[in-house]
Amino acid sequence: MPETAAPPRRSSSAWPILFGGIIVTLAFFALLSFFSEEKEPVPEIAFGQLVEDAKAGRVESIVVRGEAITATYVSDGGDPVVKESRLAENVDIVAVLRGEGIALSRAAAPAGGAGVDLEFEENSSSGWSTALTIGLNVVPLLLFGVIIWFFFKQSNRAGSQAGAFGKSHARLVTGGKITVTFDDVAGVDEAKQELTEVVEFLKYPAKFAALGARIPKGILLLGPPGTGKTLLARAVAGEAGVAFFSISGSEFVEMYVGVGASRVRDLFEQAKSNAPCIVFLDEIDAVGRQRGTGLGGSHDEREQTLNQILTEMDGFEAGTNVVVIAATNRPDILDPALVRPGRFDRKVVLDAPDVRGREAILKVHVKGKPLDADVSVEKVARTTPGFTGADLANLVNEAAILAARRDKTVIGMTDFEEAVDRVLAGPERKSRLLSAEERRLTAYHEGGHVVVAHFTAKGERPHKVTIVSRGVAAGYTRFLPAEESHFRTPEMLQDQLCAAMGGHAAEELVFGTASTGPSNDLEQVGRIARAMVKRWGMSARIGPVTFGKTEELVFLGREISETRDYSEETARIIDEEVRALIVQAAARAKAILVEHRDLLDHLAATLLEVETLQGEDLARVLGPGADAEAAGAAPPMAAMRLDAS
Ligand code: ADP
Ligand code: MG
Ligand code: ZN
């Protein structure tokens, strides 16, 4: 995939410098305390005591420095003992010593009388230590100042190359440099068609202007992560050969209120002076979420930024050839003001690609890579339901890496197969040793899934089964749909529940009890059954009513919270219905396994021997099933995206 090199943006070197500064300062203080501690504390004595000692002849010398007195005591052999004392104000030490009859030099001491070598030192003769003291106080301050200075300098620079605080981070890529075109984006034909119009407009604005046609100012790209929104926006610019300004929502949201808004202003100013061009606001949900609803802080900042975007879009005069494209995967939370006519009134939906789309995307990504003759891109596409464009790009890359690791010169089909498993379930863990008993359990568990699925008419078709550990799973079974459908019928879902219970049922049947292994299966079963009853109206007792207003990450298929809008009585019925579905599925799974116990034993034995079975090999072991032709649902990833719509 040709990626256009964007000019380097914010230099992030402020932080190393800041942290460096802090560390230096801390080290400095540590050193400081180290040195000051090295001076052993000198015992202090009262001045009176010192005079007494001097009189008794125990003091050798006294040094007076201002008010501070340092006395060195007579020692016998060892280190001289130093003691300190303090001179009270207006006390003349000379007078005091004389008064006590102490001579002011030992040499001058009369026989039998006491004497000390008295010495006065200039107060300023401690210049050295004074300088040191001052230095110790000033240097940290200086350092601190320098750090602060750096910090501000850097944050200014981050604001803009020119140095003004709050200028936009928009990366300008001029038309000549964008090399991405529509050919690089596959499997989203409708979206491309919608955008062709925009490309035409940007290329030949005069043609449209002559007819008085107005092109939509704003286009909103909607779709799950990895479906190619960013890629498509770039491709529009590449096709039209115009400048492309892109900024991501997270870059708008700043610490300081008002900075985001000024970035927006600056961004649109730049864009207008570079028209015709595209302004791309990536992940606009970061600023465009409904005003007044956000969780957490930075409210004002977001609102101001959003308001500024709206103002700018309204402020385009007729004939401003700037097209604003925004992308998000959370259309549900966008502020209504953002999507009303005149703003982002065109919506282009990008969905996870179907099998033909996946094939096309794979073809884009294998272009220029050496493939073995046995590689069938179509087959790979069929085994990857639920994969997005980004997943597929990643898959091709994984396959290439695997081939390189195996010292091959071409990428083979086995590399693709292994890459799919890796992407779905993590790398193989051959080193994870299972005991013989655990292996048998795993073989029967996975075998149970496979056999049950094999004998359900509408369920998923088993495609691959293995008892080699992968990621956190001891073994795993991958299912495939034969036909891609956007809808699920109750029969399909019931069969899916049944197959998911197959592992549990096999363990019970063969070992008497089930292990902790199927807990994951049970969770999945619970989730599907609950959705069938509560959201899809598939329970006869409850009827076609949905319960529980759930706030959901629409494209991510995850529920964040549920508001309960039903009674205790209804809750009880829901629980009963969910339970009934699961119990039914479990019973059916067990019945299938009892009936086909021979096949289960045979499959488990084969797995213990060869560890992995897939595709035709698996079909051969299984023989004819409920439906010789494959039909079914999806592997774990797609199952998580189950959507009633
Ligand atoms: P999004 O912005 O929707 O999250 P991106 O545009 O960033 O997804 O896609 C990430 C990568 O996945 C792209 O750089 C590209 O390599 C690949 N990709 C995604 N969708 C497609 C597609 N439709 N055709 C080809 N490649 C795709
Ligand atoms: Mg993106
Ligand atoms: Zn299982």
Image (cartoon, rainbow, N blue to C red):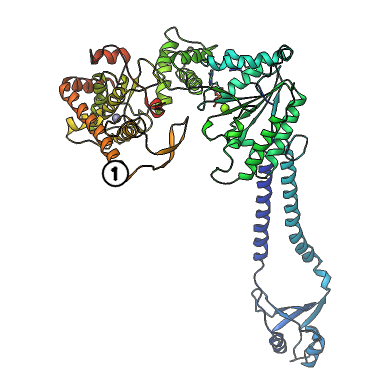
Against 217, residue 265 (above or below) is below
Q: Is residue 184 visible?
A: no
Asked whether 36 or 380 is in front, the reply is 380
Against 529, residue 196 (above or below) is above
Looking at this rendering, what residue extends furthest in the top direction? 373
Mark 1 lies on residue: 569
Asked whether 272 or 228 is in front, the reply is 272
Residue 435 falls in which quadrant of the image? Answer: top left
Asked whether 309 or 515 is in front, the reply is 309
Under mark 1, the amino acid is: Glu
Against 154, residue 587 (above or below) is above
> How far from the left and from the top, in percent, is residue 112?
74, 92
Quadrant where the N terminus sits is: top right
> How far from the left and from the top, in percent, is residue 362?
49, 15
> How far from the left and from the top, in percent, is residue 245?
69, 26
Quadrant assignment for ligand 2 = top right
Name which residue lies at 81% across and 78% down. 119
Asked whether 248 or 273 is in front, the reply is 273
Quadrant where the C terminus sits is: top left
Local SS, label 1: helix
Q: Is residue 319 visible?
A: yes
> How far from the left and from the top, in percent, is residue 314?
70, 30
